[in-house]
Image (cartoon, grey):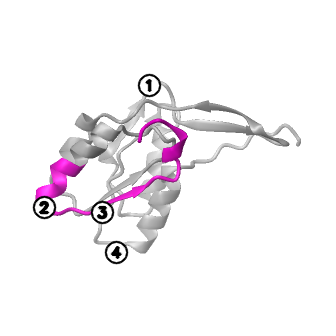
Amino acid sequence: ADDSVEKKFGGIYHALAAMANITSPDDTLLPVVGVGVEEIHDFKAVVQQWGNVNCSGIFELKGGSNYVHYFDGNPNERVENISPPIPFETIKPLLSDCDGVYINMISGSDITLETMDRIRLAVRKRKVPIHCDIHCGSLSNSF
């Protein structure tokens, strides 16, 4: 109402915060997420504070972070920047030693159905559980 702008980390930040605080300090969370050049340093600093987050899977997005700008008083008006899906080649090296996979569909187009299938095939022999939060999956044609 006062034309102020508030910028906060969202999406995967909230999932990481929850998991980092309910898992053992001996567990390691390894998020695979693209973050814009302007926010990547701050994002890594914030998630590393929990002590059990490995930032090696956080990569720089040339087009900037995902964002949604909502306009107060008009729920149907919004401006958004949605990054391209994460390629399997970015995820693949991190699957060889994992005990579980959590896929969080923040934008609805974070990964493709083909990439999800390739993740499944990569961990299937080791019977690694895959948890998929599809709360935004219905926003796109990904499924």
Indicate which disc residue 62 carries: 1
Q: Locate residue 48, reporting x and y percent.
A: 41, 56
Indicate which disc residue 130 carries: none
Secondary structure type for disc 1: loop
Secondary structure type for disc 4: loop
Q: Select label 2 or label 3 by which is in front.
A: 2
Q: Is residue 71 above or below residue 94?
A: above
The residue located at (88%, 43%) in the rendering is 1
The residue located at (43%, 30%) in the rendering is 84
Q: Is residue 7 above or below residue 48?
A: above
Q: Select label 2 or label 1 by which is in front.
A: 2
Secondary structure type for disc 3: loop
Q: What residue did someone put label 3 on?
A: 28
Q: What residue did someone put label 4 on?
A: 24
Q: Are marks 3 and 1 in contact (CB under 8 Å)?
A: no
Q: Is residue 127 visible?
A: yes
Q: What residue did someone put label 2 on?
A: 126
Q: Identify the magenta region.
A: 120-143
Q: Between marks 3 and 1, how big is the CA–CA gap?
A: 27 Å
Kind of residue indicated by mark 4: Ser
**Front residue (pair 56, 65):** 65
Q: Select label 4 or label 2 by which is in front.
A: 2
Q: Between marks 4 and 3, how big is the CA–CA gap?
A: 8 Å
Q: Between marks 2 and 3, how big is the CA–CA gap?
A: 18 Å
The residue located at (41%, 42%) in the rendering is 143
**Tag count:** 4
